[in-house]
Image (tube, helix red, strand yellow):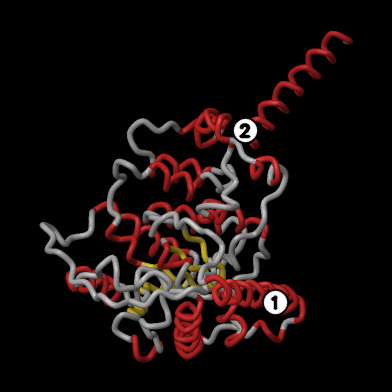
Amino acid sequence: MKRVLQSIAILLAFFALLFAAQRLVTPKYMSDVYEGAMTKEYYGAPKQNELLILGDCEAYDNWSPVTLYNEFGITSYIRGGPELRVWQAYYLLKDTLRYEKPRAVLLNIRMMHNGENEEGQEPYNRLNLDGMRPSWDKWQAVQASMTEGESTLSYLFPLLRYHERWRELSAEDFQYFFRTEKVSFNGYFLRADTKPATVFPVGPKLADYRFSDLAWDYLERIRLLCEAEDIVLILAKPPTIWPYWYVQWEEQIADYAARHDLAYYNLLEDLEAAGIDWETDSYDAGLHLNVFGAEKCARYLGARLQAEFSFTDYRRNPAIAAYWDALTREYAALKAKQLSELAESGTIQTYTHGGG
């Protein structure tokens, strides 16, 4: 019995060391490419959201959940990531349904032009999928996303992917070994700096404007899943001017929405109604919106949602209001901090964007 207990103790110590090594070498995303921390962050947030927003940077940069709550009482969460694919959005939706059932899903449809698993996509797959909790949905998301040379096991055991980071370890890896800090506000990444859009590009001609069969397949899966769960599906195109949104793409999405009786909000066609000003509302010349643009988009969205679907006003619920009031204070503090940094030095904390 003593030998058995010793063997068990040695085995447990071995796995504890493996877990510690894996945790140490896995990127923490606390000082660079913060998007890598967003997927994991969802699990620690309250599950009380009537609106789920899915998409790439047009999701997590362009809608402010804090504004949606404070002005309309709508509780929302953004599950997005850089260069997110439609199939990844589908499995994030399935993953979300394990924890809560939103009343509506807002799908940012720029993802539709990301139609295949392309060479060089692996770093984005990591940013979007590593943070998912182990589940059948994660397994399927990995299978649908892997590019040539990737391994399923390396997603389940990140030590297999990041073991060579030993030579790159920094103080951050030790500082955030046990616990990372929050980088978003219910999935929204706040940027208060401004870089006006002065050039309005015309997209180069494409050989084929059709979205891929794979993208259509997963859009249909999202629609059918929402239908089966009695969730309202809304398609949306936020007002970013680059990458270029082709009229041929617009026609395909508008036709799909009409055929399936889906709401479709194209803010590129409603710039005046949304109040977007390209002199003040982007932090990188029109590729992404800053906090002022994201707040305007949220006001536009909230007004339409309340008019068309009559969402619950959770500002009247003390238990839910307590969380959102605290989040609003944090949001206001970071916004003020960034504006102060901009006034003093012209820049905010160094930040590298993970992609679009």
Name the residue at 50% across, 65% down: 229
Q: Earlier in the sequence, mark 2 or mark 1?
A: 2
Above or below, 1 relative to 270: above
Front position in the image: 27 or 118: 27
Q: Position of residue 33 (x, y in %)?
A: 50, 53
Residue at which label 2 appears = 22
Q: Note whether residue 188 is visible.
A: no
Circle 2: is it few (<14), some (14-19), or many (20+) Cα within 10 Å? some
Quadrant of the rendering where the C terminus is positioned = bottom left
Type of the residue with mark 1: Arg
Quadrant of the rendering where the N terminus is positioned = top right
Q: Position of residue 91 (x, y in %)?
A: 46, 52
Q: Position of residue 6 (x, y in %)?
A: 83, 13
Name the residue at 60% across, 52% down: 30
Query: For the residue labelled by badge 2, is the local secondary structure a helix, a strand or a loop?
Result: helix
Distance between mark 2 and mark 1 Cα atoms: 35 Å
Residue at which label 1 appears = 329
Q: Position of residue 133 (x, y in %)?
A: 59, 46
Query: For the residue labelled by badge 1, is the local secondary structure a helix, a strand or a loop?
Result: helix
Residue 43: quadrant of the picture: bottom right
Q: Note whether residue 177 is visible.
A: yes
Type of the residue with mark 2: Gln
In the picture provided, is 321 more to the left or to the right than 59? right
Name the residue at 64% across, 78% down: 332
Residue 260: quadrant of the picture: bottom left
